[in-house]
Amino acid sequence: MPPKKGKAKKGKKKAAEGDNIEEKYTRTVHQVESLKDQLVLRRDIARQALLVKEEWKAKLQVLKNDLNEEQDVKKSIHSDMTRQYKTMRSELDLRVHRLEIEVNRLQQELTSCQQQLARVQEEKVQIIEEKDSTIKELQRKIDNMETEYEIILHDSLDLLLTKLEAAKRQWEKAATSLHSEHKGKLLEFGLNPLEI
């Protein structure tokens, strides 16, 4: 390369570089200003983000506190419900046990009552049979007594009739003889017995 041309290029280069540096500087100043504006904007955004972060942190802390309170309440309710459940369960078990004892007692009483009822029914049947037997025996005795009394009554009446007949004959005989005697006396006094 020829030396003249090289110097000319260097000169042009230096001039171009000078313009270029000023442009670069201006661009850099603009960029710095733009970056500063962006930095300010980002600082504001960062401040707002920090404020929002603090707000959310406070809300999160409130929510954590609420959650802890709710968990405490839940634990308290759970322990109370567990205690109530255990109490109710033990009361229910005790009641079931008492009812089982009562059922056993009542079953024993029922068995005893059924046995007594069976005995009473057997005794009743036996008493009814004995009464029926006694009634039949008494009826048979009554029938026998009726027959005997009937025979005795007939015999007595027959005897009485015989005695009455004998007495009637004696009375008629006595009456006839008395009548004849009185008739004779009346005739002695001159009275007609047919007129009297």
Image: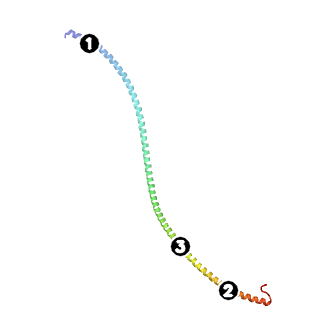
77 lies left or right of 21: right
Foreground label between 3 and 1: 3
Residue 133: x and y in percent read 52, 72
Foreground label between 1 and 2: 2
Q: Quadrant of residue 24?
A: top left
In the rendered structure, which amino acid carries the disc numbered 2?
A: Arg
Q: Earlier in the sequence, mark 1 or mark 2?
A: 1
164 lies left or right of 20: right
Judged from the image, the secondary structure of the residue bearing numbered disc 3 is helix
Q: Earlier in the sequence, mark 3 or mark 1?
A: 1
| Viewer-side residue, 89 vs 33 | 89
Residue 124: x and y in percent read 51, 68
Residue beneath disc 1? 14
How far apart marks 1 and 2 lie (CA) works out to 211 Å
Residue beneath disc 3? 136
Residue beneath disc 2? 169
Residue occupying image coordinates x 67% and y 86%: 169
In the rendered structure, which amino acid carries the disc numbered 3?
A: Lys
Quarter of the figure that contains the N terminus: top left
Q: Earlier in the sequence, mark 3 or mark 2?
A: 3
Residue occupying image coordinates x 34% and y 18%: 30
